[in-house]
Image: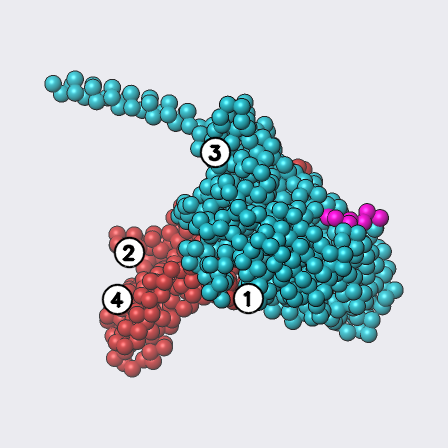
Chain colours: A red, B cyan
Amino acid sequence: MSTEKMAKRAGTKKTKMNAAMIWGAAIVGVFVLVAVLAPVLAPYDPYKMGIPYIKPSAEHLLGTNDVGQDLLSELIYGTRISLFIGIFTSIIVTVVSLTLSLLSGYYKGAIDKAVTAITNITMGLPDLALTILLIAYLNPGKLSVIISISLTAWTGTARILRSRVLQLCEMPFIKIEQAIGMNDFIIMIKHIVPNLKDIILSRAALSVSAAMMTEAGLSFLGLGDFGAKSWGTILHYAFYQNGVIRNYYWWYLPPILCTSLAVLGFMLLGYYGAQKAKLVKNA
Amino acid sequence: MKKPIKQTLCMLLAVFMCLSMAACAGGTNNDGAGTSASPSAGESSAAPGEAKHVKNLIVGTSDQPATTSILSQTGSLGKFNYNSITYANLFYPDENNDMQPYFLKSYSISQDGKELEMTFPTTAVWHDGVPVTADDMVFTFQYMRDVMKSKALRNLSDIKVNGKDSITLVFSQPDAYFFVKNATLTVFVLPKHIWENVTDYAAYTGEDAAIGCGPYKLVKVDKDAGTMSFEAVPENAYLGELTVDSITLKSYSSQDSLLMALANGEIDVIYDYAAPISYTLLDVIANNKNIDSGESGYTGCNQVTFGMSKGPNTDHAFREAAVKSLDWKLLSQLSNGSYGEIPGSGILPSACPGYDASLWKMYQDTDEANKILDNAGYKDTDGDGFREMPDGTKFTYKVAAQYAQKKQELLNRIGEVLVSGLKNIGINAYFDQAALSSDEANKSMVTNNDYDMFIGYTTTGVATYRTAFWYFLNREVAGSGGMDWGNSYNNEELNKAYQSLMAAVNNDGYLKAVGDLQKLASKDLFGFAVSWEKCFFPYRTDKYQGFKNYPSIGVVHAETFYTITAK
């Protein structure tokens, strides 16, 4: 049997999508569509100011905020920011954790000890407090939010991936590749990474949802990107103008629902890995 | 045997639950309509025929307990003390904003404005039992001038002791009136025996730092619970009989929790210096018959300063166009809802002394603004949608806000409205976030004149005498006493007019200077008020009577503790 086939066998079988994944994909798909088509879907320019505190009506389906901006348009454009920050943070988190886990699990020894130590130390840090601290000191903007969230969010994924890399490195097809003198980088990219894809995808989906929640939380606290229309920012101003006490549910409820739904969508997508693991076990 | 025991236990449990429910129901009293307040709120006591004393007045604030030093203005006590609690201010502003003696028995200013004669009581005592003497009075002014470097006393040349109950302050300049008007909140007698050996007064936190000769003595501080308790000192009742026997100052984390506490009867009255309750919270108490919203005209305001050191702001036409591009209705609604008023070009609100109603009011006219800019040469020559300078150079326009914890969101929102208006007339404006990262970054931006529009605010304390114009002065104006981090406008006419205000030796002189400053603001447009507002300091009306709602201050002020009685 060729090492290629052995490598494939080390991975998992091809499966059909489960119901949770279908729901997740549908939800995420809708949000992605809304984000892409925001200029077409939004009835108004979300920055255009008008009459404040208009209640929901045919003209403004979700009413207007404290400076007369259309809340539905804000919500639609908010999808862009929330998804952008969620997805980009997830990409950074995945790349960082994959790189570190490959180095750690493949080379073992001092590198493994160093990476494990860094992971442990980072895991010991209070992530939200550190994120808030970083946001306060970095120049305000989306990039700062992404960097601040990413800095502590990679540890969980890195630890899981490292375990899998360690496991894979003990398998015959990797040993054979090493024995015939294959380049380490090629082994990692061609034979190890493909066998990590299930974990990577499910963890990446979860990272998106976690980053979106953190972004919403930061924006709610007034620490997000000031000019950006994110769901957290809408919520921030709804609370600041006492929208909850005044029972302006059309102001504060939609961003909460959107955040929850989008997070749910990505979490359901994350079941991809769980389904695979179950199938492998049954096989 | 088992069954009867079980039944008995069940019965006992049922009785216990019924009693608990009854107790809970008795303790809940939220709407206040037609019922008395919660038992947790203050109580009253009186002998027959006497005015009923308030046994314990519970005051709520959103400031948190910090130091208890009388020389600190931070934290809940620092602000509450403005009303002469643990210390006794020499003067206090009455309902009409005229300065009345508080600790002093009387005062008089000489014709030339260089001498201030003061008489004071000989019966007052410090809270450690030591009597207050003329020595303490002399020490106070020397300490303020030499150690605290008080600007109001920078020209104090001599202190004459006229007897055991009278001294005269002698100034080298006509500063006496300025000193009195400026002494509203924080000029009080210091105990010599405590402070004479303290040079770093700001850092001193010894227990005796709380000792003053105010009408109330601090008896308990519970920082975890956020409460401070005070008891009356009858010897120090300077305005007559103290009708409030004790005070509890309770801190809350936010204005909404503060208002909820008032609605539930946990507190009797709200005191939040320079932070009236937001109009957005008034719905909470709208239907509560036992709460008065404490509405009054507000002397403070949010204001915008033009950065005048560089760029297009040096051109009056540009400033005029900028002002006319703004949505004034939205600005006034944003700050104060339906209570907000579009401001006049003279900046000072109608609640301020010397307000000039004849000056033109702000209005939005985008067409006119565009025309002004076109005529002045600010045209979009490269077709990018933004205007260039008359010489063709491109420019961006930086709008920034003051770093202000309690009202940052409002200032930021105002910034957004300003940027939106400016963009409508083709100015490439943006709101600067970097300056909001810290107080230091903010001050650095201002001191470096690195802004085009700066949104700040004037508190009641400044508005009372120094006026909002204080914030428009250049920090380098010699002898003006301008704000520490001032702005970039160094205009001779403005400096002269403001110096006249500070050199005024009587009300007429002061009011004339205030009028001149407003006219100058209207003509030069070096800045503008964002809106004129009403303020709200709500209080309960079901238990106590005799509250006087002072404009901009509310019902908690120096007189409150001598006038309110239980119903």
Question: Who's the residue at 59% across and 27% down the image?
Answer: B289
Looking at the rendered structure, whether the residues under marks 4 and 1 are on a common chain is answered as: no
Q: Vertical placement of A238 versus B499: above or below?
A: above
Q: Which residue is mark 4?
A: A167
Label 4 neighbour load within 10 Å: few <14, some 14-19, many 20+: few
**Which numbered tag is attached to residue A280?**
2
Discs 3, 1 touching: Cβ within 8 Å: no
Task: Determine whether the residue tagged by mark 2 lies in a helix, strand or loop.
Answer: helix
Q: Is residue B150 visible?
A: yes
Q: Which mark is first along the chain, 1 or 3?
A: 3
Q: Name the one closer to the observer, B351 or A13.
A: B351
Look at label 1 and name its amino acid: Val
**Which numbered tag is attached to residue B55?**
3
Discs 4, 1 touching: Cβ within 8 Å: no
Task: Determine whether the residue tagged by mark 3 lies in a helix, strand or loop.
Answer: strand
Q: Which residue is mark 1?
A: B147
